[in-house]
Image (cartoon, rainbow, N blue to C red):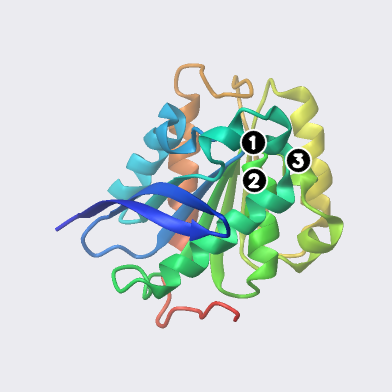
């Protein structure tokens, strides 16, 4: 039986709102990170989340920024703030009965990819896998990129020229199991026919391979 709930996660002085959906027999839980405040309602994120759930992976889609914060465009590039919100959410799911036993993964889009990698570095060996879609992993610090231990997949559109180079820079700094995939015919938002489906398939395969474990990793205090 699928568990579905609108959740409110304490995050300092703010509250992060998200939609938590866990299919029966889930092999793990993926937290979605996006740089804007509309992550929970993003059609692209929701499509990918649906494909992950079909593959047996639970999802938590969150608005890392409050509506007020999101009105300030520069906040979307505040990697420190986005990372802290993601860490708050990761620790929250580690305390909930319905999610605490599920291995953890991160899916980052846009500047959320940098936050996902920063969070993965901060949490040590707790996260099991990270996927970036059209992300800006280059906005994560060099120190954080070198500390990521979770297998990391970078997905970039073949027509997203500048972002390809930025992803390559971040890829070169990663020391974990890693792969960078150029999706042919895709621009930054993967709006072209079949391109988002390719992203979802790759992401689902990555999480299905690396999330399942005999005993979940524990989050660092």
- In this rendering, is residue 9 above or below 107? below
Horizontal side of residue 218 vs 48, given as left or right? right
Point out the tag, 2 or 3, that comes first from the N-terminus: 2
Question: Which disc number belongs to residue 110?
Answer: 1
Comparing marks 2 and 3, which lies closer to the viewer? Answer: 2
Residue 142's quadrant in the figure? bottom right
For the point 58% across and 60% down, the residue is 12
The quadrant of the rendering that contains the N terminus is bottom left
Of badges 3 and 1, the one in the foreground is 1
Location of mark 2 (residue): 113
Q: Quadrant of residue 113?
A: top right
Position in image of residue 97 (x %, y %): 30, 74
Q: Secondary structure at mark 1?
A: loop
Q: Residue furthest front?
A: 13
Q: Quadrant of residue 95?
A: bottom left
Q: Are marks 2 and 1 in contact (CB under 8 Å)?
A: yes
Q: Decide if residue 22 is on the left or right side of residue 122.
A: left
> Does dot 2 land on a helix, a strand or a loop?
helix
Q: Quadrant of the C terminus?
A: bottom right
Q: Is residue 125 visible?
A: yes
What residue would you read off at disc 3? 167
Residue 180: image location, x then y, percent? 67, 45
Q: Earlier in the sequence, mark 3 or mark 1?
A: 1
Report the front residue among 198 and 103.
103
Along the line of sight, the residue nearer the viewer: 180 or 64: 64
């Amino acid at each position: 039986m699928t568990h579905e709930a609108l959740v409110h996660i304490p995050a300092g002085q703010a509250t992060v709102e998200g939609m938590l959906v866990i299919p029966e027999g889930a092999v793990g839980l993926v937290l979605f990170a996006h740089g804007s405040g509309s992550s929970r309602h993003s059609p692209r994120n929701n499509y990918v989340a649906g494909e992950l759930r079909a593959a047996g992976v639970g999802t938590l889609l969150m608005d890392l920024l409050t509506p007020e914060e999101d009105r300030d465009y520069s906040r979307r590039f505040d990697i420190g703030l986005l990372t802290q919100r993601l860490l708050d959410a990761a620790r929250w799911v580690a305390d909930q009965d319905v999610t605490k036993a599920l291995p953890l993964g991160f899916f980052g889009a846009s500047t959320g990819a940098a936050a996902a990698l920063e969070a993965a570095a901060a949490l040590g060996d707790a996260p099991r896998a990270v996927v970036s879609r059209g992300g800006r992993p280059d906005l994560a610090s060099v120190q954080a990129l070198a500390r990521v231990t979770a297998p990391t997949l970078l997905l970039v559109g073949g027509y997203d020229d500048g972002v390809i180079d930025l992803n390559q820079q971040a890829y070169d700094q990663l020391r974990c199991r890693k792969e960078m995939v150029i999706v042919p015919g895709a621009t930054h938002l993967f709006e072209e026919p079949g391109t988002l489906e390719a992203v979802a398939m790759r992401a689902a395969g990555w999480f299905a391979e690396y999330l399942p474990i005999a005993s979940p990793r524990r989050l660092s205090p």
